[in-house]
Image (cartoon, rainbow, N blue to C red):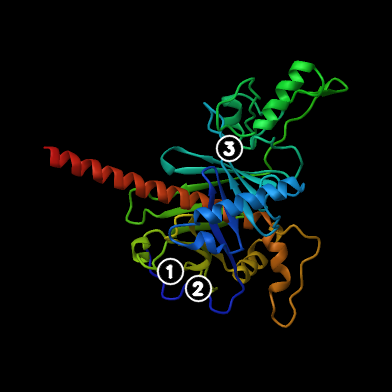
């Protein structure tokens, strides 16, 4: 863990996202604070019933179950029996109203995460939350040779309880039974040519840098030619009771830039965001990004990552003009995706270590 004397820019423009456990298979990353999920014990039974009632009323009225929010993110973990499909980061508040942005593939023992950045086309994922068979890039050897290819999943004639896309699987079974409609597992052809499967636009790797060193809480990734790090920090804390127990849970996002002409060999570390863990049972924590700092980094070193026709000019020294475009960029999505990977891996490593210590203690007591 590293202690920074000054971590949070006091006057900078920043974005705050609250990470809530909405269900076992998904997380909500939203700028909107939910008081019922902020409590240590989580929402009461009465509040849970009221939430379910509101969702049913919205669905009966033909509205999305969750209020759409373009500034939010949504992390979904699809479940298919006997398969381990990648998690999906959506830009929006719900996978039913949002656009899939990144597929997250997990490596063994938290050493590596592969992020496939999806193109902005419709139908690249089916209602199960996975790539359909028509977008399958090939066998294991072909997928390993080309990281941009996607792994597709067929629709089975059966499903186990809890699998994603129940209504979708039923509709496909009905299509196969009646012969009316297009089977998603049958690759269509046009003028004798098969449909080309979709591929990822870019691939980013998040890697555990030094597992056996003194600085084990450090993950590294590169994007747009810039090197970034997620690592532990002791400069933020959970202020509520027992928050001191989370001192090894907090993280920060930094990049290292070259120094001035006089000191080219030196590396200046710039903090771009922080993650503060929470003691609330239904909340992972709070994610903060220093938008003004990120925008200056993009302007100086990676202007091409912004998907806009004209660069927003800054007037009177204000940088807020380009922040909305920057928050819609792939770079921002990669920041959120890597943060979720880091949070998950650190939590699993802590639980694994605690289980190991408990087993050792029980074995010693038994001896």
- Residue located beneath label 2 in the image: 8
Is 106 left, or right, of 124 in this rendering?
A: left
For the residue carrying disc 3, how many other residues have a C-alpha within 10 Å: few (<14), some (14-19), or many (20+)?
A: many
Residue at (64, 29) in percent of width and height:
152
* Picture coordinates of residue 88, whole percent (x, y): 61, 43
The relative height of residue 119 versus residue 68 in the rendered view (above or below) is: above
For the residue carrying disc 1, how many other residues have a C-alpha within 10 Å: few (<14), some (14-19), or many (20+)?
A: some
Q: Which residue lies furthest to the bottom in this view?
A: 316
The relative height of residue 323 versus residue 190 in the rendered view (above or below) is: below
Q: Is mark 1 on a helix, strand or loop?
A: loop
Using the rendered image of the protein, determine whether residue 314 is visible from the camera's viewpoint: yes
- Residue located beneath label 1 in the image: 236
Marking on residue 99: none
Is 120 left, or right, of 252 in this rendering?
A: right
* Picture coordinates of residue 55, whole percent (x, y): 66, 50
Which of marks 3 and 2 precedes in the sequence?
A: 2
Judged by depth in the image, the label closer to the viewer, 1 or 3, is 3
Separation of marks 2 and 3 at Cα, in angstroms? 36 Å
Q: What element carries label 3?
A: loop
Judged by depth in the image, the label closer to the viewer, 1 or 2, is 1
Residue at (64, 37) in percent of width and height:
129
Is 339 left, or right, of 95 in this rendering?
A: left
- Residue located beneath label 3 in the image: 78
């Amino acid at each position: 863990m590293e202690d920074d004397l000054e971590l949070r820019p006091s006057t900078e423009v920043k974005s705050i996202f609250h990470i809530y456990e909405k269900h076992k298979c998904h997380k909500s990353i939203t700028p909107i604070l939910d008081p019922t999920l902020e409590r240590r014990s989580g929402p009461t039974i009465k509040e849970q019933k009221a939430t379910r009632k509101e969702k049913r009323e919205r669905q009966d009225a033909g509205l999305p179950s969750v209020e759409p929010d373009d500034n939010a993110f949504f992390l979904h973990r699809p479940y298919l029996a006997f398969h381990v499909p990648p998690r999906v980061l959506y830009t929006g508040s719900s996978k039913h109203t949002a656009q899939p942005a990144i597929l997250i593939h997990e490596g063994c023992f938290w050493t590596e995460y592969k992020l496939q950045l999806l193109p902005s086309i419709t139908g690249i994922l089916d209602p199960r939350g996975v790539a359909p068979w028509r977008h399958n890039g090939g066998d294991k050897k072909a997928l390993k040779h080309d990281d941009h290819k996607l792994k597709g999943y067929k629709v089975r004639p059966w499903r186990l309880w809890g699998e994603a896309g129940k209504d979708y699987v039923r509709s496909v079974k009905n299509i196969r039974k009646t012969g009316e409609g297009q089977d998603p597992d049958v690759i269509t052809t046009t003028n004798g040519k098969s449909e080309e499967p979709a591929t990822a636009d870019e691939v980013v790797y998040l890697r555990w840098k030094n597992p056996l060193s003194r600085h084990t809480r450090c993950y590294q990734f590169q994007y747009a030619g810039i090197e970034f790090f997620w690592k532990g920090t002791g400069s933020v804390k959970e202020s509520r009771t027992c928050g001191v127990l989370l001192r090894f849970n907090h993280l920060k996002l930094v990049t290292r830039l070259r120094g001035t002409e006089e000191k080219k060999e030196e590396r200046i570390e710039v903090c771009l965001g922080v993650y503060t863990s929470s003691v609330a049972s239904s909340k992972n924590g709070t994610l903060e990004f220093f938008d003004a700092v990120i925008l200056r980094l993009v302007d100086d070193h990676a202007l091409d990552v912004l998907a806009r026709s004209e660069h927003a000019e800054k007037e009177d020294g204000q940088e807020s003009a380009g922040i909305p475009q920057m928050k819609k960029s792939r770079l921002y999505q990669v920041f959120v995706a890597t943060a979720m990977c880091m949070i998950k891996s650190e939590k699993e490593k802590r639980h694994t270590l605690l289980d190991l210590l408990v087993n050792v203690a029980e074995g010693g007591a038994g001896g």
